[in-house]
Amino acid sequence: MRYANLGRSRLEVSRLCLGTMNFGSHADARAAHDVLDAALDVGITYVDTANRYGPPERPHASEEIIGEWLAADPSRRDRIVLATKVFERTHPGPNGGGLSARHIREACEASLRRLRTDHIDVYQMHHVDRAAPWPEVWEAFDLLRAQGKITYIGSSNFAGWHLATAQASAAARGALGIVSEQSVYNLAQRTVELEVLPAARELGIGVVPWSPLAGGLLAESDASGSGRRRSAEFAQRAAAHREQLEATRDLAREASLSVAVLALAWLLAQPGVTSTIVGPRSRSQLEALAEAADVDLGPAVLARLDEIWPGPGPAPEAYAW
């Protein structure tokens, strides 16, 4: 496993990040704990969750399951970089969601209880809150940092101008600001290359892609859309990308890699990408993906992937001239 600094911070994280959205829904506690153990076994130390990952009947399941795993062996806490998120509504009525100072404080305390820890390494804004003034947001985070409850701040699903505005507000306070941004990014979805990636690189923010396999599109065993994902919507997507998927499968075979590992390795080769999230449901799935962190794709393979899955390029050149 390889490691990198998260954005401009000195915090080192594994180049694969264990995403835990499946915990409690597609992976019960036993399977989830096995995946967490497997992550440590292969060197993955970056664990990402959120305060609303779980089925309707247990909406906080992911944090709770991770908390159970940490409580079973407290030494694990020092071995991982633990990240969770705030924004989603956690109770009905006013102040139950968003990024008000009150909700940030309440949500952090609740996450700490569920995770059974006294601090969160990377506390992330799950979405931008256009109604919340940045001085209020930063004041709330500053207080949590002063109390030792959080260490770094991250964001998720921000536009490039959101990142710029947030960093300008943080800089005015003499604060480090955002160190990571989680965005949807994969060979089939490259919109972030227009503005999010350039902004993040300029501002020293490490990009951590989610959905790196395009919702399973880049994990299929063939280009027909058959296999574990059989929904009509998925079949339609697979059919729309049939030629690209076939070409990618051929390229992966030439490189002696699975399509999934090829797609992950491509992401990790992109400037500005620190780590990428993988969300396996089992130990075997995780072990099959772990290879990606140690794969170096040569210029010819990277160029061929850009031909198969062309990106938009940076703004404004992509559309202005």
Image (cartoon, rainbow, N blue to C red):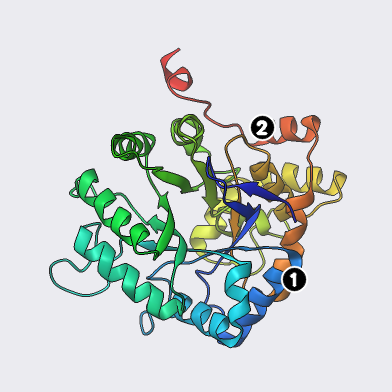
- Secondary element under disc 2, as helix, strand or loop, is helix
Whether residue 211 appears in this view of the structure is yes
The answer to whether 272 appears left or right of 194 in the picture is right
Instruction: Work out whether residue 13 or residue 319 is closer to the camera in this orientation and state it.
Output: 13
Q: CA–CA distance between discs 2 and 1?
A: 33 Å
Q: Which mark is residue 306?
A: 2
Report the residue marked by disc 1.
Answer: 41
Quadrant for residue 77, please give it: bottom right
Residue 230 position within the rendered picture, expressed as x and y whole percent measured from the top left: 58, 67
Q: Is residue 216 left or right of residue 121?
A: right
On the image, the x and y values in percent for residue 78 come to 60, 69
- In the rendered image of this protein, does residue 5 appear above or below residue 194? below
* Residue placed furthest toward the top: 321
Q: Are marks 2 and 1 in contact (CB under 8 Å)?
A: no
Residue at position x 63%, y 74% in the image: 36
Taking the image as shown, residue 206 lies to the left or right of residue 53, namely right
Q: Residue at x 44, y 24 (%)?
A: 315
Q: Position of residue 111 (x, y in %)?
A: 38, 73
Q: Position of residue 80 (x, y in %)?
A: 60, 66
